[in-house]
Amino acid sequence: MISHLSHPYISKALQGLQLLDANMRPRYWACVWRTMFGGSLKDNTIRKKLRAIDALYLHADAIFPTEMKDALDDALNDLDSDRLETILESWFVSLINTPGTTHANNARWKVGRDFVTSMVTWIAKSDANDTLRKIESRLIQLSLLYGQLHVEKRRNVQGIRALPASVVQALYELLDPNSSNNPFVRKATRWKIYVPFILMLHQGLRRGEALILPANSVKNAFDKRLNARRFWMNVDGVSDEDDLLDSRHSKPYLKNHNSRRQIPMSEFTARIVDTYASNFRGRPNHSFLLNSQWNRPLSHERLTQAFAQVSKCLPENVLKELKDRTGQDSISPHDLRHTCATIKLNQLLEMGFPMEEALQMMRAFFGWSRESSMPLHYAKAVFEDRLASVWNNAFDARVTLLRSLPPGY
């Protein structure tokens, strides 16, 4: 299993994501690999690789059931070429025979094979005999077998679409913190879900980006040129101090360096964030904006679960249109980002920007690289007539949102 180790008595080199056995002890060579090769990788990449390595460890334990539950570590310690060959070949066969073999199985095999290769090379580099040569020769043969794994052709991204207007309208009404139909009982919980709903739908944030926002992420300054106050949001990574305070099992993260950006926002959206931060966030010992009922940073799982709960509360006719239009039975947080991207592109085109210039502005706003083709996937949806019934350039001035602000705003 994968766990995040963090304790004053644990060496800094061992802190962070580590692979543990059934007795909660670190897997030795996985720990070495993490120390040697994991320093330059993001947590999410390390987590994916550790999952594959964990699968290899569990497989090794399963095929040597009479041994101690460290079969792979023992084989690596002893440079036991026969046992390593057995472990890798049998794991390879099990992956091939998995129903519906996919690209994920190929990636899992490659990570596991590279893990064994790198560890064997490192252990045996000073070996005077030909153990390393024999093992590497066999690993090369196993690598050739890798080409036999069938990779399913990935489908082109054709189905990215905005949520139907009726679905978004229903979400506004359900998630209004003052709505009698809101599925959440506690006022603080209502605002805790409402704020990421607004940020993903209006600001186009990814779920992970919303979850790592600091409480002071919204900025403002007076713009003399416009003779008005301007508001924006900084989307950035997590500081080392905040990372140590982050107790979440699946830590959110920035997808890549293009995700670091500054997003303009309306005064209205800024006031919603400020209302939550000032009145409903509480006083946790962490700096993340979204706070759980137990004063811990809001997790991926809780946010996804909340939207699954909201989906069940949608009217039957709305759920039917959602199914008919998107093929989905429920709403995920990322659907809101898709919807925002579709609407933003539509707005830019209506404002008269040429398509290429509009796409480049989309890349900057949503955190895509200058060469990214992602904006093109939204071009089709912007021309659907039914979108015009809800979306327009007054995107941030909806009466349903204004009703959600406490008295005095």
Image (cartoon, rainbow, N blue to C red):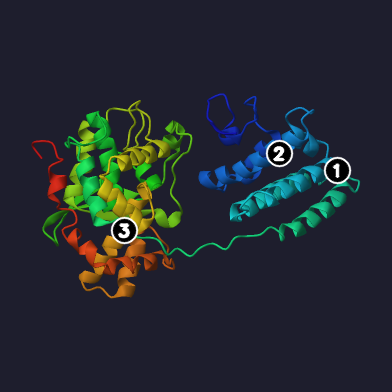
Query: Which of the pair 130/305 is nearer the observer?
Result: 305
Give the residue at the far left of this rendering.
Answer: 408
Query: Which of the pair 4/380 is nearer the observer?
Result: 380
Task: Confirm whether residue 196 shows in the render.
Answer: yes
The residue singled out by tag 3 in the image is 162
* Residue 45 x, y percent position in the rendering: 55, 47
* Residue 321 x, y percent position in the rendering: 29, 54
The residue singled out by tag 1 in the image is 82
Numbered disc 2: secondary structure? helix
Judge left or right: residue 8 versus residue 131. Answer: left
Q: Residue at x 65, y 40 (%)?
A: 55
Quarter of the N terminus within the rendering: top right
The residue singled out by tag 2 in the image is 59
Numbered disc 1: secondary structure? helix
At label 1, which amino acid type do we have?
A: Asp
Looking at marks 1 and 2 on the same chain, the residue that comes earlier in the sequence is marked by 2
Quarter of the C terminus within the rendering: top left
Verify CB contact (< 8 Å) between mark 1 and mark 2: no
Verify CB contact (< 8 Å) between mark 3 and mark 2: no
Judge left or right: residue 264 versus residue 37. Answer: left
Q: Residues within 10 Å of mark 2 (few under 14, many from 20)?
A: some
Numbered disc 3: secondary structure? loop
The numbered dot on residue 294 is none
Q: Residues within 10 Å of mark 1 (few under 14, many from 20)?
A: few
Q: CA distance from mark 1 to mark 3?
A: 55 Å
At label 3, which amino acid type do we have?
A: Ala
Looking at marks 1 and 3 on the same chain, the residue that comes earlier in the sequence is marked by 1
Which of pointers 1 and 3 indicates the residue nearer the eye?
3
Q: Residue at x 31, y 66 (%)?
A: 381
* Residue 367 x, y percent position in the rendering: 38, 58
Which of pointers 1 and 2 indicates the residue nearer the eye?
2
Q: CA distance from mark 3 to mark 2?
A: 42 Å
